Image (cartoon, rainbow, N blue to C red):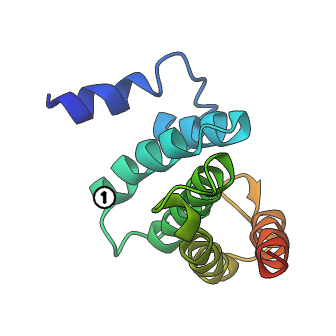
Amino acid sequence: MSGKASRISALWSGVDPRGRDVRYAAYFHHFNRGDFYEAHDVLESLWLEGGREARNAAFFQGLIQLAGGFVHMRKHFENPEHRVHRERLGPAYRLLELAEKNMKGYGGSWEGVSVEALCQLAKNWRGKLESQ
């Protein structure tokens, strides 16, 4: 197992999968704790394994993009004067937009979560970024 794979597999250690793939459960575990980079990485491993044609592919991609948007926002707001991080709000906005686009096709609820609420979260944060 490579160093990255080992680091990522440690991210789902101790997470209760509740009948789902442990990486899916670990995504929400980390996302809800504000560990957006970790949430992104753990679900990306499942998304890559399943392939782009899997029935959950666009949904997983949307969740990954949602976490990625929050990674960009955090880096910007933690260090807004940094030459790289001060430019992260545009990419954050685009990732949140893509996240909503990829998830909304899954209806009101999918895989045990409210897609509607996730899309609203992305939309609300895009609205906040527009006022920046």
* Rendered position, 33 above or below 112: above
Which residue lies most toward the left here? 1
Q: Amino acid at mark 1?
A: Leu
Looking at the rendered structure, the number of numbered marks drawn on it comes to 1
Q: Is residue 21 visible?
A: yes
Q: Is residue 81 above or below residue 43?
A: below
Give the position of the N terminus as an image quadrant: top left
Residue under the point 84% across and 64% down: 117
Residue 82 rendering spot, x and y as whole percentages: 52, 55
In percent of width and height, residue 8 lies at 35, 33
Position of 83 with respect to 62 (left or right) is left
Determine which quarter of the picture holds residue 2: top left
Compare residues 65 and 102 and report the one nearer the observer.
65
- In the displayed structure, 33 sits above or below 54; it is above
Q: Quadrant of the C terminus?
A: bottom right
Kindly identify the residue that appears in the image at 68 percent across and 39 percent down. Answer: 34
Apparent side of residue 78 relative to residue 83 in the rendered image (left or right):
right
* 66 to 15, vertically: above or below: below
Q: Residue at x 44, y 69 (%)?
A: 57
Q: Position of residue 5 (x, y in %)?
A: 25, 34
Residue that mark 1 sits on: 48
- Is residue 20 visible in the rendered image? The answer is no
Q: Secondary structure at mark 1?
A: helix
Identify the residue at image location x=54%, y=70%.
87
- Specify whether 8 is left or right of 118: left
**Horizontal arrangement in the rendering, residue 104 relative to residue 8 (left or right):** right
